[in-house]
Image (cartoon, rainbow, N blue to C red):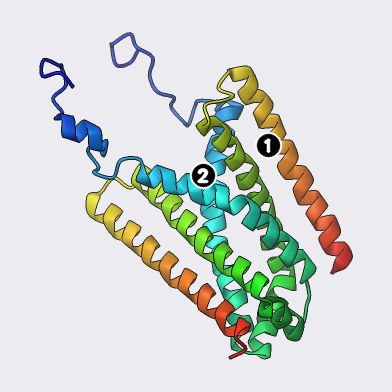
Amino acid sequence: MANGSGRPLSPHLQVYKLPRTALLSITHRITGVGLAVGTLLLTWWLVAAATSPAAYERAQHFIGSFFGLLLMFGWSLALYYHLCNGIRHLVWDAGKSFELSEAERGNQIVIGAAAVLTVLTWIIGLAVW
Amino acid sequence: MASNSKTLRSPLQIARGLGSAKHGTEHWWHQRVTAIALVPLTVWFIFGVIRHLGADHAAFVAWLESPFSALMMVLTAVVTFHHAQAGLQVVIEDYVHNEMAKILSILAVKALCFVLGAACVIAVLKISFGA
């Protein structure tokens, strides 16, 4: 070992292939930060609606634009991922599902649920829009 | 706690259980409480947004004029910003190691979350009370 202690070193992120569990863990944090940025749009939307019909139309126009829809898609996926993985964190907080096999099954449930909910939301959303 | 115990902590410190940060598990607990509250609030919010996609101003105002919708939207905004500032604080504490930069960025994030949260609440109340 490079530090001469004979003890394992912490993973060097540039050369270390993250396990799926670690990848999902950092994704939870990244989506959390992304959703925090997304609250700017939520604030704009509500404040615009409270200001005037014209201001509200501008916000709706931006959300309905290509860039706006792209952001909305990203945020909906991030929201569902953070929601599903957050529920998994609450299960862990309750002291359950710590075995590696359970964590790997949890990975699949979280990814699957987030993907299905996102696609379902957009199918319904585009249908009623 | 027996007096011959090997701990250096006083029995009072142990009973209080606040640790070196003097906050105990309060921050962690708040993050969990807000997380649990956000599960139903987020589901309500998503349904609300889908039902008002492309809605004109009158329809949107009519939605938030309902006391229940206003209540849910205020709760969603307040709990979301509380959860966001708690989460962002942990992220900053993990990655920003310069003490001054860390404290200033945490204060900036908290200030921004308070301002945005208050703006959301005032906006919803203004619509709801028809001002």
Q: Nearer the viewer, residue A2 or A27?
A: A27
The number of numbered badges drawn on the structure is: 2
Secondary element at tag 1:
helix
The C terminus of chain B: image quadrant: bottom right
Q: Which residue is mark 1?
A: A110
- Provide residue A2's location: percent of width, then percent of height: 33, 15
Q: Residue furthest left?
A: B3
- Provide residue B94's location: percent of width, then percent of height: 37, 42
Badge 1: chain ID: A
Residue B19 can be seen, yes or no = no
Q: Residue furthest right?
A: A127
Q: Which mark is residue A28?
A: none
Nearest to viewer (mark 2 / mark 1): 1
User: Mark 2 or 1 closer to N-term?
Assistant: 2
Q: Nearer the viewer, residue A79 or A14?
A: A79
Q: Which residue is mark 2?
A: A29
Badge 2: chain ID: A
Q: Is residue B93 left or right of residue B19?
A: right
Q: Label 1 is placed on what type of residue?
A: Val
Q: Which residue is found at the position 15% from the left and 16% from the top?
A: B6
Secondary element at tag 2:
helix
Question: Do the residues under discs 2 and 1 have CB atoms within 8 angstroms?
Answer: no
Q: Is residue A108 left or right of residue A37?
A: right
Q: Which residue is found at the position 79% from the left and 68% from the top?
A: B51
Residue A18 can be seen, yes or no = yes
- Provide residue A44's location: percent of width, then percent of height: 58, 75
- Provide residue B1's location: percent of width, then percent of height: 18, 22
Callout 1 crowding tier (Cα within 10 Å): few <14, some 14–19, many ≥20: many
Figure check: B104 above or below B65: above
Q: Label 2 is placed on what type of residue?
A: Arg
Quadrant of res B97: top left
